[in-house]
Image (cartoon, grey):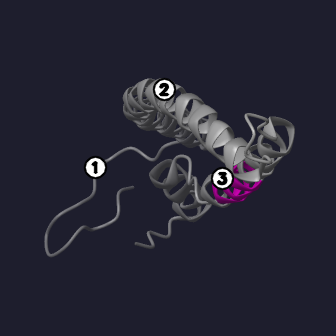
Amino acid sequence: MTAPDGPGRTNDAPQASVGELFGEVSKDLSALVRQEIALAKAETADSAKKAGKGAGMFGGAAWAAHFFLLFASLALWWALGAMIGDGDDNPALGWAALIVAVIWAVVAAVLAMQGKKQMKRVRGVPQTADTVKKIPDALKGENKP
């Protein structure tokens, strides 16, 4: 017997068995997982592409900056040696080299700390993480924005 579906109507839709319902849920869950994986791949590929271009440009800039710093350091080393020396064509190049090396050690330490700080800001795949968190609610039938 079918139940009335409004005035003068009957609901002729067949009732699904538990097995059929479980099959549908499994199919939907599988599709959801595939979509989340596809989203994560797309986000990761986009981020990697942008990061790759940026890294290439930073690499080129670092290469050029290396040569600038090398020659600037040599000039500073020689100038400090001439200033520290006794003035009779006897520059103190050893002490000057040590001073320049300490300067570069301080610069390296500051840059390392700043790099560590920046790496902590990397977010990964935020949209995928957000939607994955919503899966349990969706399985319960809740749809929270």
Determine which of the numbered discs, if any, sits on residue 12 in the image.
Answer: 1
According to the picture, the residue beneath numbered tag 2 turns out to be 59
Which class describes the residues within 10 Å of circle 3: few (<14), some (14-19), or many (20+)? few
According to the picture, the residue beneath numbered tag 3 turns out to be 111
Q: Earlier in the sequence, mark 1 or mark 3?
A: 1
Regarding mark 2 in the picture, which secondary structure is present there? helix
Q: Over which residues does the magenta segment extend?
A: 106-116
* Residue 43 forms part of the magenta stretch: no
Residue 67 image offset from top left, x and y in percent: 51, 25
Residue 107 image offset from top left, x and y in percent: 68, 53
What's the CA distance linking mark 1 and mark 2?
Answer: 69 Å
Q: Earlier in the sequence, mark 2 or mark 3?
A: 2
Residue 26 image offset from top left, x and y in percent: 59, 36
Tell me where residue 47 sits by quadrant.
Answer: top left
What's the CA distance linking mark 2 and mark 3?
Answer: 15 Å
Q: Quadrant of the N terminus?
A: bottom left
Q: Mark 1 or 3, which is nearer the eye?
A: 3
* Residue 113 forms part of the magenta stretch: yes
| Apparent side of residue 7 relative to residue 137 in the rendered image (left or right) | left
What amino acid is at disc 3?
Leu
What amino acid is at disc 1?
Asp
User: Front-most of 98 and 4?
Assistant: 98
